[in-house]
Amino acid sequence: MAVKGKIMIIEDDRAICNFIRRVLEANDYETVLVHTGREAMSLLASHCPDVVILDLGLPDMDGLNVLMDLRSWSLMPVIVVSARSDEREKVRILDAGADDYITKPFGTSELLARIRTALRHTRMMGTSASIARENRFTAKGLVIDYDKYRVYIDDRDANLTQNEFKLVALLGRYAGRVLTYDYLIREIWGPNKAYDNQILRVNMANIRRKIEKNPAEPQYIFTEVGVGYRMIEGD
Ligand code: CA
């Protein structure tokens, strides 16, 4: 079977490293194992993997230093493996340029889902397959029409305001990934509104009333508490 992509695993814990490698190779990915930050920095350029899985706690340096060095020359997708699940840590990881994070301990299906999302975004250059094809995003009855600036739920116009549409459109472009509160606010309202999460919360509440069957249990846009929002993967 054809290899689905080359994944570099940067992790000093051999047990976790081998676990990830077994899962990935069983699913037809090629893997490259690296155990230190210094080794990673020199091998990233020569291997040019399709996705990088990066542990933050490396023996010789903070994994974020590897990420920041990588971001100075490449946008290749990076999924950070973090031991802690606190919100400030997740924001720090995403702000440093990671595409996603996964918290230890994690399961096989979660890991594979994150890798699929990351790969899809590389292949489509930040645009999901259906957006590239017909300028629309679809997921379980939700349609974002990027030409008409409209969102439909089961063929009914959700009647979003301009800013509500911009928010949903942005989340749709990066479906499957968490976008942080600050990032969303800056993109929609500009840099001066940064740190005013209230305006974002109000807009999201209105969006959910219009698109979700039960806004308390959303099925399209999920809250990552203290971090941001994530749109469901497209069909
Ligand atoms: Ca470690």
Image (tube, grey):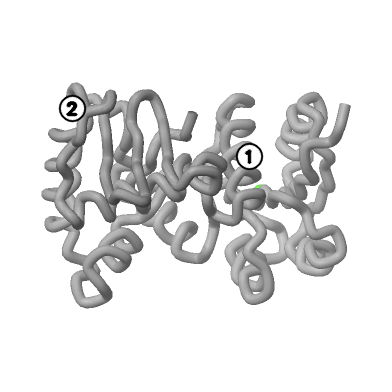
Location of residue 63 (image quadrant): bottom right
Instruction: Provide residue 82's location: percent of width, then percent of height.
Output: 54, 47
Q: Residues within 10 Å of mark 1 (few under 14, many from 20)?
A: many
Left or right: 160, with 118 as reference point: left
Residue at point 15%, 34% (across, down): 210
Q: Callout 1, which amino acid?
A: Ile
Spatial CA span between label 2 and label 1: 28 Å
Examine the image and state in which quarter residue 58 appears: bottom right
Q: Point out the tag, 2 or 1, that comes first from the N-terminus.
A: 1
The percent position of residue 195, horizontal first and vertical second, equals: 22, 66
- Closer to us: 172 or 3: 172
Secondary structure category for the residue under label 2: loop
Location of residue 70 with respect to 26 vertically, above or below: below
Q: Quadrant of residue 72?
A: bottom right
> Label 2: how many residues lie within 10 Å, few (<14), some (14-19) or many (20+)?
few
Q: Is mark 1 within 8 Å of ligand 1?
A: no
Above-or-below relation of 163 to 65: above
Question: Which residue is nearer to you in this view: 36 or 174?
Answer: 174
Depth order, front residue of 37/149: 149
Q: Residue at x 30, y 47 (%)?
A: 168
Viewer-proximal residue among 20 and 126 = 126
Whether residues under marks 2 and 1 lie with C-beta atoms below 8 angstroms apart, the answer is: no
Location of the N terminus by quadrant is top right
Q: Residue at x 18, y 58 (%)?
A: 197
In the drawing, what numbered circle is on residue 125?
A: none
Q: Going by the image, does 67 lie left or right of 226?
A: right
Badge 1 is on which residue?
A: 115
Residue 174: x percent and y percent?
A: 46, 49
Q: Tag 2: residue type?
A: Ala
Residue at the image position 76 percent from the left and 32 percent from the top: 24
For label 2, the residue is 216
x and y, in percent, of residue 136 in the image: 42, 42
